[in-house]
Amino acid sequence: MTDQTRWGIHEVQTRNKAIKYRRDLVARAMEHVVKLDETGITDLMIQIEAEYERKYGNNKKNKVVL
């Protein structure tokens, strides 16, 4: 066991936590990517396009020139 009062221990622990968090984050992201197959991606793209049209589709008609 290392002496917790030594200089640099906090920095080492912080770096190790960041590495572990990044590794866990990548693992969780890869799980989601594996779950999405081609049809899932297509459905997601359709949903995104529909939401975009709902939010921004009328901007050209309602655009006010300043």
Image: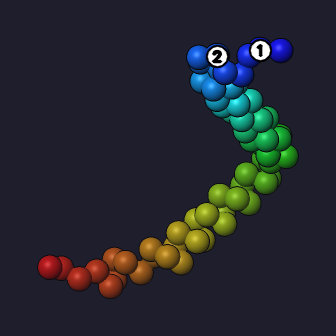
Q: Residue at x 77, y 35 (%)?
A: 24
Q: Give the residue drawn at x 28%, y 80%.
A: 63
Asked if disc 1 and disc 2 are in contact, CB closer than 8 Å, the reply is: yes
Residue type (three-letter) at the residue carrying disc 2: Arg
Residue 17 in the image: above or below residue 45: above
Does dot 1 land on a helix, a strand or a loop?
A: loop
Residue under label 1, please give it.
2
- Quadrant location of residue 23? top right
In x, y percent, where is residue 14? 64, 29
Q: Is 65 drawn above or below residue 17 in the view shown?
A: below
In the picture, measured across the screen, residue 27 lies left or right of residue 58, that is right
Residue 48 placement: quadrant: bottom right
Q: Where is the C terminus found, in terms of image quarters?
A: bottom left
Circle 1 residues within 10 Å: few <14, some 14–19, many ≥20: few
- Where is residue 58 shown, x and y percent of the image? 41, 81
The colour scheme used here is rainbow
Q: Judging from the image, what secondary structure is the residue with disc 2 in?
A: loop
Work out whether residue 28 or residue 1 is closer to the camera in this orientation and state it: 1
**x, y percentage for residue 12?**
65, 20
Relative side of 4 to 57, left or right? right
Q: Residues within 10 Å of mark 2 (few under 14, many from 20)?
A: few
Whether residue 15 is visible to the viewer of this picture, yes or no, is: no
Which of 36/14 is in front? 14
Give the residue at the far left of this rendering: 66
According to the picture, the residue beneath numbered tag 2 turns out to be 6
Q: Is residue 2 above or below residue 57?
A: above
Could you tell me how far apart the alpha carbons at marks 1 and 2 are, in whole angstroms?
8 Å
